[in-house]
Amino acid sequence: MQVHIPLKKSVDNSYDITIDTLPSLHFDTKVAIITNPKVAGLHLGYLLSKITAKELYIITVPDGEEYKNQQSVDLILESLFNHRFNRKSLLIAFGGGVIGDMTGYVSSIYQRGIDFIQIPTTLLSQVDASVGGKTGMNNKYGKNLIGAFHQPQAVYIDPHFLSTLPAREFGAGVAEIVKMAVTFNKEFFEFLENADLHDKKVLQEAIKQAVQTKADVVAKDEKEHGLRAALNYGHTFGHVIENETQYKTYLHGEAVAIGMVMANATAVAMGLMQEAEALRIKTLLEKYDLPTTYVIENTQSFYQTFFLDKKSSDTTITFIIPKGLGDVEITDNIDETLILKVLERFTKR
């Protein structure tokens, strides 16, 4: 005996990404702005001048990647329950990638899913983390291993917030811009080589191109079954670096920058990239003071941590390897010996 549940349907998760001065926003429901003390101190007044709502609450969580955890998620959830939020309520992620990921995750699980919007305040979150609906939190096993695909209702990218961005945070965002150029757009990479991203107009154009690149990829592969995995270029190595340093030494974009250098070294060893191309990428990253070196203490331990990556299985590791500039290969068929030889190059102080 069988009972069939017909659930085939089309779901429209489309939304707009606005790259401009934040417009006035009105919500006829309960709204919670999720932020951290640093962002609130710098920009909350500006945001509040743009928002009206039936009821408006501010929820702050500690600042830093190490607080992207269950305790912070519980803090947000408890506040929502205390204020009796319902399925028509709305969350606003107001901060960098950590805030965006956690807010999106909470909105995906609170009463089985409520709406949220992204108002990213760092360059990294504007060009990458806020777009595409990836949400999550970290645990002791690795980064973003708990989460959900939950698309925002809208994303508002206001360059105003970048005026107070520290130099390291700016560089971390540049790393994600470079990532998208290397994997999908050689012309964009060449534009970046000759551009000064400290120029506001040039930066806005770079943000637009990076966001458009990611939007195109997400539209083709929302749940990362194939093409979208290419956007993890640099991340397979970078996540291990973050894990080894307990998320306290490097910003996410800094770890990704080192991860790209490691992925490039792998690509050169495989004959997929020229040494000169790898050097061009390294030079562009260093132009914005991004780290490009890391000392691996134990190559076997580093290698084993790859298996905790979400793209990997219990027996194979999926690597994102650039094929020159503007193309990429997603593979789980790289010999362990080759990877260990590449990692050995990063053991020297």
Image (cartoon, rainbow, N blue to C red):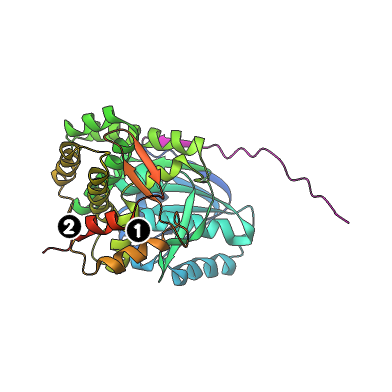
Q: Is residue 130 above or below residue 105?
A: above
Foreground residue among 263 and 61: 263
Residue 150: x and y in percent read 54, 50
Name the main secondary structure of what is drawn in magenta. loop
Foreground residue among 68 and 180: 180
Judged from this view, the residue extending furthest toward the left is: 349
Say few, some or many: other residues with alpha carbon within 10 Å of mark 2 (under 14 / 14 to 19 / 20 or more): some
Query: Can you tell which of label 1 and label 2 is closer to the viewer?
Result: 2
Foreground residue among 265 and 219: 265
Q: Is residue 12 magenta?
A: yes
Cα–Cα span, label 1 and label 2:
43 Å
Q: Is residue 4 magenta?
A: yes
Say few, some or many: other residues with alpha carbon within 10 Å of mark 1 (under 14 / 14 to 19 / 20 or more): some
Foreground residue among 88 and 268: 268
| SS at badge 1 | helix
Residue located beneath label 1 in the image: 40
Which is more N-terminal, label 2 or label 1?
1
Residue 58: x and y in percent read 45, 61
Residue 63: tell me if it is visible: no
Residue located beneath label 2 in the image: 345
- Badge 2 amino acid: Arg
Quarter in which the C terminus is drawn: bottom left
| SS at badge 2 | loop
Residue 100: x and y in percent read 43, 54
Q: Is residue 214 above or below residue 173?
A: above
Judged from this view, the residue extending furthest toward the right is: 1
The residue depicted at 26 percent of the width and 35 percent of the height is 324
- Badge 1 amino acid: Ala
Residue 325: x and y in percent read 27, 34
Magenta span: 1-20
Quarter in which the N terminus is drawn: bottom right
Residue 332: tell me if it is visible: yes
